[in-house]
Image: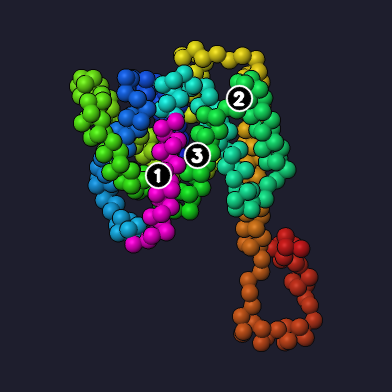
Amino acid sequence: MEGKNEQRAGLLYGIGAYGMWGLVPLFWPLLKPSGAIEILAHRMVWSLGVVAVALLVVRRWAWIGELVRDRRKLGLISVAAATITVNWGLYIWAVNNGHVVEASLGYFINPLVTIAMGVLLLGERLRPVQWAAVATGVVAVLVLAIGYGKPPWVSLVLAFSFATYGLVKKKVNMGGLESLAAETAVLFVPALGFLLWLAATGESTFTAGGAGHGFLLAATGIVTAVPLICFGAAAVRVPLSTLGLLQYLAPVFQFGLGVLYFNESMPPERWAGFALVWLALSLLTWDALRTARRNRALALKLLATAAAAPAPTTPNSASTAPNAASTPPGPADTTQDPAQQKVT
């Protein structure tokens, strides 16, 4: 019963995390007239403050000394910080400039880009269905490029930057809170310096927009950290296959907001491109679920085989084996052990 409650809680945490990420396009327009770079700088500065408080509460500080001594990991954190800066900055710009649907496409195709990078950079092998999904995704991008009259650069940069970020994070192997703290710490000085420069030149909107606007800019730290905390709580409670399905909630919500709330245009060729993307993701999801079921079935079969195997002979039993072999079998010896029947 306790396990079911934990899974139910994990599912709610996961829905909350991806739901908040999906609804965040409603937040960024509230920060106008601040520009995307100013919003991004505030996000970096205030996120570090919120995450530092969270780490203080859970008392997780030992990783800092280890990270400072590990130059390779510190370098990877810097690369991760650079890629997430590109991703966050472009996403904020896209939402505040009428490209919510195109931004959602970036997160729809992100799993396909991640798979392609795994093949090209890590030499991973794909199953036939995965190849079909990637090929369908490429066709979808071509259809959308024809519809837009140009490649969907916003979608592609968002997808590739986030896939690169995920690849680097995999090599860093740090917890979500710790990783976000390290990344924002790397960016804190340049972000704060930029905000101070804006204030010195009279271009800052932090105080010029009033107390309410300043509070909203400070809230970017909460908007960044809370979904991540919920995601971390979900990741330890539900299977990865469930998280893999939940990840589509964010772009679905973003797409819905772009079409229904922001009233962005969706001509037929754009619908066709999105339909191909959704087909590719359906193939990918079906293949992942089928593979997970097969792996579970194989694991259960191996466990059953191991449980049914006869116990290994001890030296004492081995020494008495010749005497037993010389004794003519009686009625009891003609009945085979059920466990041995299963093995054969």
Q: Secondary structure at mark 2?
A: loop
Using the rendered image of the protein, determine whether residue 35 is visible from the camera's viewpoint.
yes
Give the residue type that dot 1 points to.
Ala
- First along the sequence among labels 2 and 1: 1
Q: Residue at x 37, y 20 (%)?
A: 29
Determine which of the numbered discs, if any, sits on residue 81 in the image: 1
Determine which of the numbered discs, if any, sits on residue 150 in the image: 2
Q: Is residue 267 magenta?
A: no
Residue 342: x, y in percent? 72, 60
Q: Nearer the viewer, mark 2 or mark 1?
A: 2
Q: Nearer the viewer, mark 3 or mark 2?
A: 2
Residue range of the region highlighted in magenta in the rendering:
69-90
- Tell me the residue that label 3 is attached to: 161
Overall secondary structure of the magenta section: helix
In the image, taking residue 53 as reference, residue 169 lies left or right, namely right
Give the residue type that dot 3 points to.
Ser
Q: Which quadrant: the C terminus?
A: bottom right
- First along the sequence among labels 3 and 2: 2
